[in-house]
Amino acid sequence: MTTVKVKRKKLKLRVVFLTLILLVLLGYLIYFAFNKLIDTNIKNIYVIGNQVLKDYEVIELAKIQNYPKILSISSQEMERRIKANPYVKEVQVKKRIGSQVYIYITEYKPLFYSKVTKKLILEEDKELYSDEPLNNIPILINEISDKSIYQKLIERFSLIENSVKQKISEINYVPNEVDKERFLLSMNDGNYVYITLPKIEELNKYLEILPSLENKKGILYLDSGNYFEIFNN
């Protein structure tokens, strides 16, 4: 019996000894990996979802243009810095294996640029002063003295799809005795479109209508009647 007890005791000691060795090795590996992680610079930066802001502008906002150590700045700090930009609606920063940083951006959609006030109008009633309009953004060329109509223009313009909005070069407020919410849109393909604010969603059919015009240029009346008047050569 004594011999058996001694053998069991030796076996337990061996197990304890091996366990300690494994724990020491595991601790060393964790320490080594952690130190390597601390010493690793950001290798790749991916910016996703931005349209107005350029990739390099987002990276500069986050202050990681010099590819610092991956742990020298937190995701929350980068998000806070980027969110300070007025174009940014939402932002999420993710650090991933391989020292990679992914920045997911949601911007306020630009609606149009007012030539009179020199303001860029964004969705959700956001406005920014700007000396120059953005590319592919319609320009409101005249003043709308009725503030309620101007506000309605902003609200209704957000319903226009981006693919159609990019086709509009100028917005001209042209009310008449019948309709105080009437506009004439100059399209960058040479056509003109009359539209009234209650029917502004009809503009989303513009790309579907174009093939039926057979490359002819003219005025499309979407404010009433829905017909096309061809320009005389």
Image (tube, rainbow, N blue to C red):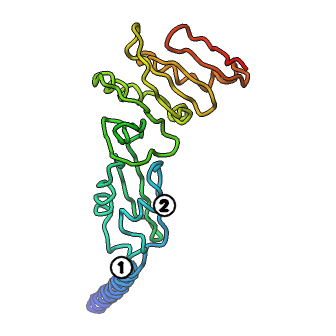
Q: How many marks?
A: 2
x%, y% of residue 87?
36, 48
Q: Is residue 93 left or right of residue 161?
A: left
Disc number for residue 163: none
Q: Amino acid at mark 2?
A: Tyr
- Describe the element under mark 1 as helix, strand or loop: helix
Disc number for residue 46: 2
Front tag of 2 and 1:
2
Q: Is residue 34 left or right of residue 207?
A: left
Give me the residue at 34% from left, 73% from top: 71
Sort mark 2 into few (<14), some (14-19) or many (20+) by Cα contacts within 10 Å: few
User: Residue pushed farthest front?
Assistant: 233
User: From what the image shows, is residue 106 above or below residue 158?
Assistant: below
Q: Amino acid at mark 1?
A: Ile
Q: Nearer the viewer, residue 64 or 57?
A: 57
x%, y% of residue 173?
42, 23
Distance from the alpha carbon under mark 2 to that under mark 1: 21 Å
Quadrant position of the C terminus in the picture: top right
x%, y% of residue 85?
32, 54
Q: Nearer the viewer, residue 31 or 98?
A: 98
Give me the residue at 45% from left, 16% from top: 199
User: From what the image shows, is residue 131 above or below residue 156?
Assistant: below
Give me the residue at 45% from left, 49% from top: 52
Residue where numbered disc 1 is placed: 38
User: From what the image shows, is residue 214 above or below residue 122?
Assistant: above
Q: Nearer the viewer, residue 25 or 176?
A: 176
Give me the residue at 46% from left, 46% from top: 134
Mark closest to the chain's N terminus, 2 or 1:
1
Based on the displayed image, in which of its 4 quarters is residue 41 positioned?
bottom left
Q: Nearer the viewer, residue 22 or 9?
A: 22
Q: Is residue 88 left or right of residue 214?
A: left
Quadrant position of the N terminus in the picture: bottom left
